[in-house]
């Protein structure tokens, strides 16, 4: 477990499958994310059960509210390479009543601290759809900077969108 001010990051459990399935089938939650193919709840549970344990290359945490241990989202550092000291970050808050209340910001700061302090990363990167203004603000708030623009790489509702690629170097984390 990794403690933030508002959240606890913890390993995913088989019992998290129902929440994960619900979030992945909520069009508002998945609006700016690649949602892949529909899965049934049993397949999601099997994926959690068979997923390899967290390793340096791929760390997946559930995001829990510290005060009541409610699971509200996921955060992941993936494709980490010790040779380059770089990893990619993915996050989403699936419980919409926790949007805009600082939980994503705290989870971002907490996982970045973990990445820099425990994994000894030098850089964390992510991509975000340019129209996902709320997420873009959260990433900027914790210190990520726009490093580039990927043109028309995300499709939603028959329209193509650009994505920002963003980066955070060790020592740039705010808060």
Image: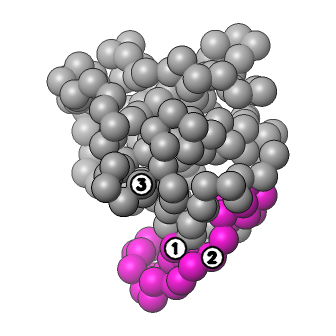
Which residues fall within the magenta stretch?
A: 136-165
Element marked by disc 3: loop
Image point (79%, 40%), residue name: 102
Give the label on residue 165, or none.
1
Image point (72%, 38%), residue name: 106
User: Residue 119 in magenta?
Assistant: no
Element marked by disc 2: strand
Give the label on residue 146, or none.
2
Q: Of callouts 2 and 1, which one flags the residue occurring earlier in the amino acid sequence?
A: 2
Q: CA distance from mark 3 to mark 1?
A: 17 Å
Q: Is residue 171 above or below residue 47?
A: below
Left or right: 93, with 25 as reference point: right
Residue 96, position as x, y percentages in the image: 66, 39
Q: Nearer the viewer, mark 3 or mark 2?
A: 3
User: Residue 148 in magenta?
Assistant: yes
Which quadrant: the N terminus? top right
Residue 18, position as x, y percentages in the image: 40, 22
Of 60 and 161, which appears nearest the observer?
A: 60
Residue 141, position as x, y percentages in the image: 78, 58
Residue 31, position as x, y percentages in the image: 52, 59
Q: Of callouts 3 and 2, which one flags the residue occurring earlier in the amino acid sequence?
A: 3
Residue 99 in sight in this render: no
Characterize the magenta stretch by its predominant secondary structure.
strand
Characterize the local packing of mark 3: few (<14), some (14-19) or many (20 or more) Cα atoms within 10 angstroms: some
Q: CA distance from mark 2 to mark 1?
A: 6 Å
Q: Of callouts 3 and 1, which one flags the residue occurring earlier in the amino acid sequence?
A: 3
Element marked by disc 1: strand
Q: CA distance from mark 3 to mark 2?
A: 19 Å
Give the label on residue 85, or none.
3
Residue 151 in sight in this render: yes
């Amino acid at each position: 477990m990794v403690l933030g001010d508002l959240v606890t990051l913890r390993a995913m459990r088989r019992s998290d499958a129902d929440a994960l399935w619900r979030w992945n089938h909520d069009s508002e939650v998945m609006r700016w994310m690649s949602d892949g193919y529909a899965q049934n709840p049993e397949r999601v549970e099997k994926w959690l059960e068979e997923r390899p344990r967290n390793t340096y290359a791929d760390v997946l945490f559930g995001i829990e509210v510290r005060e009541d241990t409610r699971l509200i989202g996921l955060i992941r550092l993936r494709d980490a390479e010790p040779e380059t000291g770089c990893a990619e970050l993915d996050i989403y808050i699936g419980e919409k009543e926790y949007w805009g209340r600082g939980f994503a910001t705290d989870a971002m700061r907490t996982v970045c601290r973990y990445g820099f302090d425990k994994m000894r990363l030098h850089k964390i990167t992510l991509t975000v759809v340019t129209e996902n203004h709320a997420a873009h603000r959260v990433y900027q708030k914790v210190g990520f900077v726009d490093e580039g623009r990927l043109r028309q790489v995300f499709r939603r509702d028959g329209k193509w969108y650009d994505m920002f690629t963003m980066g955070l170097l060790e020592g740039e984390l705010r808060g």
